[in-house]
Image: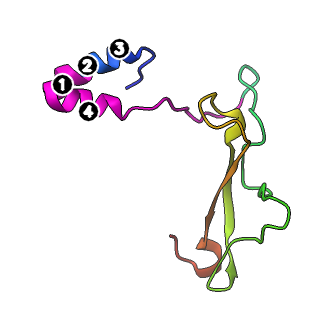
Amino acid sequence: MEFDDPAVMRRLCGERLGPEAGPQFAAMARRGFRLAAASEKTPATGRSQLGGSALLEPGTPWPVLADVPLSLHAVLDTGTLYFTIPARAFAAGDFSKAEATGQCC
């Protein structure tokens, strides 16, 4: 479900979950974002990417597990994704050990 109007979300939560659980569930809701492929109509935002180089702070060592360097899957440049995320740019990386061990997670 997508909710552009918080009042509609609160009303629907109340209708579907009842007068006690509905408002509690609605109070936990936070605005978010949806990831979608870039196109000519909607160009890429910031430095988010699949694969490539990690956007690590200078001096940050590459992540390892059991002395094996992890593989980078994706980088999310959260500073450009949505206005409610803190203003300080933060790049979240998704790493795994799949290539190093043949296993995942």
Magenta span contains residue 35 = yes
- Badge 1 marks a residue whose secondary structure is helix
In the rendered image of this protein, does residue 99 appear above or below residue 77? below
Q: Which mark is residue 16?
A: 1
Is there a contact, CB below 8 Å, between mark 1 and mark 2? yes
- What whole-number distance in Å separates the C-alpha atoms at marks 4 and 1? 12 Å
**Label 2: which residue?**
12
Q: Considering the numbered disc 2 on the image, is that residue within a helix, a strand or a loop?
A: helix
Q: Which residues are magenta?
A: 13-38
42 or 7: nearer the viewer: 7
Residue annotated with mark 4? 24
Residue type at mark 3 is Ala
Would you call the spot at circle 4 few (<14 residues within 10 Å), some (14-19), or many (20 or more)?
some
Measure the C-alpha gap from mark 1 to mark 2. Answer: 6 Å
Q: Amino acid at mark 2?
A: Leu
**Residue mark closest to the camera, 4 vs 2:** 4
Q: Quadrant of the N terminus?
A: top left
> Are the residues tagged 3 and 1 within 8 Å (C-beta)?
no
Q: Nearer the viewer, residue 40 or 82?
A: 82
Which one is in front in this view, the residue at disc 3 or the one at disc 1?
3
Viewer-nearest residue: 18 or 2: 18
